[in-house]
Image (cartoon, helix red, strand yellow):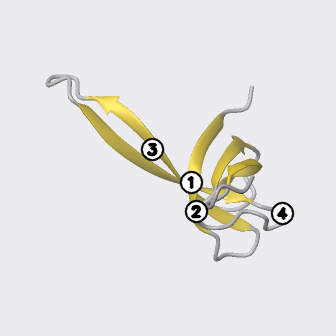
Amino acid sequence: MKKKKRGKVISADMDKTITVAVDTHKQHPRYKKYLKQRSKFYAHDEEEEAKEGDWVVISETRPISKKKRWMLEKILEKPGGES
């Protein structure tokens, strides 16, 4: 099974590459407080259809370049309510 992650596109400036921020919540082991953690992933976008602010699903793939190991699977929601 390939891993999938849901996140928001924070940059679409590069050719065929988007930067996706994925937020998770982790519980502190001692104090039990939930902390927000953000990870950035570079994903391949062949048609360059994702824009900044879109909510997307990315899936794991073979290494495409030094930092790209994810591929755009689908766009869930665009800003302004478009789908």
Residue at 45 percent across and 44 percent down: it is 23
Point out the tag, 4 or 3, that comes first from the N-terminus. Answer: 3
Return the mark for residue 26. Answer: none
Give the residue at mark 4. 46
Query: Please, what is the three-letter code of the amino acid marked with disc 3?
Result: Asp
**In the rendering, which numbered label is found on residue 53?**
2
Mark 2 and mark 1: Cα distance apart in space = 6 Å
- N-term-proximal mark, 3 vs 1: 1
Q: Are marks 2 and 1 in contact (CB under 8 Å)?
A: yes
Q: Element at badge 4?
A: loop
Label 4 or label 2, whichever comes before in sequence order: 4
Mark 3 vs mark 1, CA separation in Å? 9 Å
N-terminal label among 2 and 1:
1
Element at label 2 = loop
Quadrant position of residue 48: bottom right
**Where is mark 1, residue-wise?**
8
Q: CA distance from mark 4 to mark 2?
A: 18 Å
- The foreground one among 32 and 69 is 32
Give whichever of discs 4 and 1 has the lower sequence position: 1
